Amino acid sequence: MPPTHADNTADTAENSDARDAANADNTAKAFLALHHGRSPADPLILPGPWDAASARIFADVGFQALATPSAGIAASLGYEDGGGTPVDEMFAAIARITRVVDIPVSADVEDGYGLAPAELVERLLEAGVVGCNLEDTDLATGQLKDARQHADWLARVREEAGDRLVINARVDTFLRGDTSAAAAIERARLYVAAGADVIYPLLAPVELVTELAQGVGVPLNMATMPGGPALAEIGELGAARITFGPGLFHEAMEALRGHAERLHSAQPGA
């Protein structure tokens, strides 16, 4: 019996899903490849767009990939960071960013917003990203999660994602007051064993970058702060990837404030 219209429709949908999955795989793999084989003085630089307009600017000047900051997006939408942005609004903002650029985008989705691994991965892929930041702070309590439980959760995220997402596991020991490299490395190794591709020790001091890079066994993400070392210097210390958190958003807002103040002061009678 010849195939029915319903059969053809189902086949078409399955083929489309297969192509989409293959494209996501290839893009994520290409994004991960950007982290490897680089000169120490040439780390991967990932600016942090907070909306579609800023993403276009970063892409237009030639950056290879982008990494959204949850804090920058939250502020642009009128919310506090740390889980203050409604989940639907966060993913909608991320999707607007990926829609206007043709380079890989990784998304900071904090602690996953309480989503089950399958739903989290589905929403990330629907938003068009090929990577994500996942932190080990429990936003509900402000405390570090149990490292092994978090590693188990990361393993489930990896299982759902396969090779379609580059997982950047954020380690918050320095943020929570533990200043030792050993504590960060201990957690990082659990997360790498669970499937993390990159490790991001937030607020780690520059003098520990080399020890951390050697200890985690995968590319190290470091965030740079105003007045910090040059990007090439951070790379030479061992960081394969450099991000900026909400720093670029704050710089842009300060520049806008300066323009606004000059306009205001130029008004007659000001």
Image: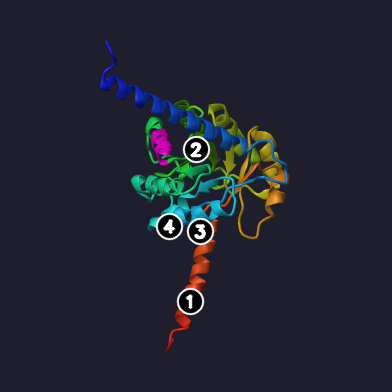
N-term-proximal mark, 2 vs 3 = 2
For disc 1, the neighbor class at 10 Å (few under 14, some 14 to 19, many from 20) is few
Q: How is the image coloured?
A: rainbow
> Hey, what amino acid is under mark 2?
Val
Tell me where residue 102 appears, x and y as whole percent: 51, 44
- Residue 76, picture quadrant: bottom left
Q: How far apart in space, not on screen, are marks 4 and 1 (Cα)?
A: 20 Å
One can see residue 197 in this view: no
Residue of label 4: 75
For disc 2, the neighbor class at 10 Å (few under 14, some 14 to 19, many from 20) is many
Residue of label 3: 249
Residue at figure coordinates x 44%, y 84% from the top left:
267
266 shown above or below 100? below
The question of residue 257 being in magenta is answered with: no
- In the picture as drawn, the residue positioned furthest to the front comes out as 2
> Hey, what amino acid is under mark 1?
Glu
Residue of label 1: 261
Q: How far apart in space, not on screen, are marks 2 and 3 (Cα)?
A: 22 Å
Asked if labels 2 and 4 touch by Cβ distance under 8 angstroms, the answer is no
Tell me where residue 149 appears, x and y as whole percent: 47, 30
N-term-proximal mark, 4 vs 2 = 4
> Hey, what amino acid is under mark 3?
Phe
Q: Which residues are magenta?
A: 120-127
Residue of label 2: 130
**What is the secondary structure assignment of the residue under circle 2?**
loop
Q: Is residue 203 left or right of residue 156?
A: right
One can see residue 27 in this view: yes
131 shown above or below 17? below
Label for residue 154?
none
Secondary structure of the magenta portion, mostly?
A: helix
